[in-house]
Image (cartoon, rainbow, N blue to C red):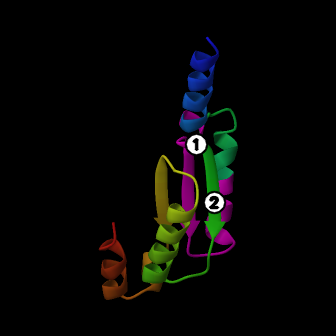
Amino acid sequence: MRNQLSKQKRKSEVQETSRTMLIVCEGEKTEPNYFKGFLRDLENSKIKVKIIGEGYNTVSLVKRTMEIRGNEANYCRVWVVFDRDSFKTQQFKNATLYD
């Protein structure tokens, strides 16, 4: 019985961790504020959202996101957000090559 409760507790901890979403933004203020507004609509949701404003350009932002994802909890979704109009087409294409 004790072992079964222990397994259930671990399972719920894993499920809780996997319900965290990571959003890494190019901008340090504007984009994070957009998503914080979005979060108010999700207040009663079981999904947690972590929003980070980094201030990096396209490829650097993707690399930083990969670093964060590798060092922290498992996320159910990971978004990288940057203003496509602020960068050259090639920079945007290079950023989308990462997986």
SS at circle 2: strand
Mark 2 vs mark 1: give the one in front: 1
Q: Is residue 26 left or right of residue 58?
A: right
Residue 37 % position (x, y) = 68, 52
Amino acid at the residue labelled 1: Thr
Q: Which residue was labeled with disc 2?
A: 51
* Disc marking residue 17: 1
Is 74 a magenta residue? no
Tag 1 secondary structure: helix
Residue 5: tell me if it is visible. Answer: yes
- N-term-proximal mark, 2 vs 1: 1
* Image coords of residue 80 (percent x, y): 48, 66
The stretch in magenta equals: 15-36
Q: Residue at x 49, y 73 (%)?
A: 82
Front-most of residues 24 and 40: 24
Instruction: Say the numbered circle drawn on residue 79.
Output: none
At horizontal 54% and vertical 34% (from top left) the residue drawn is 15
Q: CA distance from mark 2 to mark 1?
A: 16 Å
Relative to 92, 81 lies left or right:
right
The residue under the point 66% across, 74% down is: 28
| Residue 27 x, y percent position in the rendering | 61, 75
Query: Quadrant of residue 99 in the image?
Result: bottom left
Of the residues shown, which amino acid type is indicated by label 2? Answer: Ile
Relative to residue 55, is residue 10 depicted above or below? Answer: above
